[in-house]
Image (cartoon, rainbow, N blue to C red):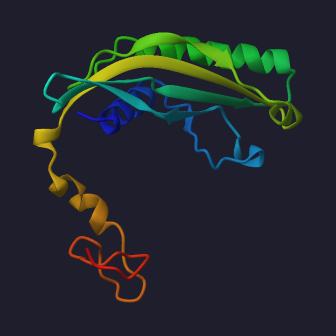
Amino acid sequence: MTAQVIYAAMLAAIAEHMPQLRKGSIDDVPDAIVKPSVTIHILEGKPEWNGNGTVAQVKCSPQLSIVVMNMKSAEDRKCEALAIENVLMGILHGLEPDGCDELDYAGWKDTTSQSHLESRLTVIQVTFNTAYEINTNEVNPRMLDAIWTSYTEPETGKTLLGSTENFEHGETP
């Protein structure tokens, strides 16, 4: 299993139990935030390889960024963000995405910057720990077919699925 499974399971659990939250984006600008949002980040996976180097336990720490904006005080916004954090912790701690270890709540941190404060935002980062196994003998490039079909070459309209040409450099493998 992969980090995509963890991301999808977290997103589904949040959508099911807290539909009031908006799925955030790293592209959000303060003016676009009209209700509390949450963004899921899985920034890194660290493998611990077995003796023959084909199977690894990949440890990762999925993170949520909770963003609250309102015209109240910074203290009120923080209280609201922490209330949301508390509920998300209850929803996600112990969640077991398919083929992965359970999510283990690891804590929260206030990551509100000065620029956030000026925009009347509060940002709380929530961290979980989990792991999943990868086996290099089971990797199949066909898993990427859905991705390749979503990219289209501007000149020809063809998808990258059947392409043998390097899209950006005009080189062939």
Foreground residue, 140 or 62?
140
**Percent position of residue 65, x then y:** 60, 29
Outermost residue toward the left? 137
Q: Quarter of the image containing the C terminus?
A: bottom left
**Percent position of residue 74, x then y:** 84, 21
Q: Quarter of the image containing the N terminus?
A: top left
Foreground residue, 49 or 73?
49
Q: Is residue 166 left or right of residue 36?
A: left
Q: Is residue 115 above or below residue 26?
A: above
**Percent position of residue 26, x then y:** 61, 45
Q: Is residue 158 above or below residue 116?
A: below
Point 23% across, 27% down: residue: 56
Corner quadrant of residue 73: top right
Q: Is residue 69 above or below residue 139?
A: above
Q: Is residue 29 left or right of residue 14?
A: right
Point 25% across, 77% down: residue: 163
Point 38% across, 26% down: residue: 13
Foreground residue, 138 or 146?
138
The answer to whether residue 57 is seen in the rendering is: yes
Foreground residue, 106 or 138?
138
Corner quadrant of residue 149: bottom left
Outermost residue toward the bottom? 155
